[in-house]
Amino acid sequence: MNGEYLTVSAHIRRGLAELKIIVERTESIWQQSLRSSDDYYVDAAALNLHSYYAGAERIFEMIATRIDRSLPDSAHWHKELLEQMTLEIPGVRPAILDLQLWKRLDDYRGFRHVVRNIYTYNLDGDRIAFLVKNLPETAAQMEQALSAFADLLEQLGAA
């Protein structure tokens, strides 16, 4: 299991680096949208917000599969997976997300669902603005939480 811990930690750290790029791109695109009357920038910002949560969810799926050994499989598995990350699993791992971060990420999860299910010209610009504004703080909390978990996995892997 030691090698597994180190592998998962490496994947978490790579995923966090990729999420950081998405945050930077989202902020840059949003600034362009504020300077331009071109709605395509709003669409691009929405796509990057979608990508941010999709990247976070890939990390959570890996943790659920390789550490928890339990991936939700119901019709609401996306929501259940996010909730699973708030759980302490005795003898397996501590909770990864606190309830504040869970709530923030749940906003992005819900928005990801919207992006996947409506035409871009129907997206709510105010909702996108809210999510873009909150993305840096959400990403910082996410990086802190997942880095702490990766640190723990590395300690366990080295033992």
Image (cartoon, grey):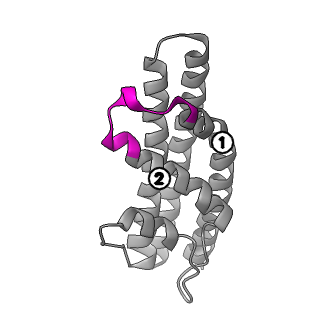
Q: Secondary structure at mark 1?
A: helix
Q: Evaluate whether residue 42 shows in this view.
A: yes
Amino acid type at image mark 1: Asn
* Residue 63 drawn above or below residue 58: below
Residue 108 shows which numbered tag? Answer: none
Residue at the image position 62 percent from the left and 38 percent from the top:
130
Label 2 to label 1, Cα distance in Å? 14 Å
Q: Evaluate whether residue 146 shows in this view.
A: no
Task: Tell me which secondary structure the magenta stretch mostly adopts.
Answer: helix
For the image shown, how many numbered marks are present on the structure?
A: 2
- The one of 111 and 126 positioned closer to us in this rendering: 126
Q: Is residue 124 magenta?
A: yes
**Magenta-drawn segment:** 114-126
* Residue 123 drawn above or below residue 83: above
Q: Position of residue 152 (x, y in %)?
A: 63, 71
Residue at the image position 52 percent from the left and 10 percent from the top:
37
Q: Position of residue 87 (x, y in %)?
A: 56, 77
Q: Quadrant of residue 21?
A: top right
Q: Position of residue 41 (x, y in %)?
A: 48, 20
Q: Residues within 10 Å of mark 2 (few under 14, many from 20)?
A: many
Q: Secondary structure at mark 2?
A: helix
* Residue 63 drawn above or below residue 70: above
Residue 109 shows which numbered tag? Answer: 2
Q: Residues within 10 Å of mark 1 (few under 14, many from 20)?
A: few
Quadrant position of the N terminus in the picture: bottom left
Q: Quadrant of residue 91?
A: bottom right
Q: Is residue 136 magenta?
A: no
Left or right of residue 141, residue 129 in this image: left
Amino acid type at image mark 2: Arg
Q: Earlier in the sequence, mark 2 or mark 1?
A: 2
Residue marked by disc 1:
134
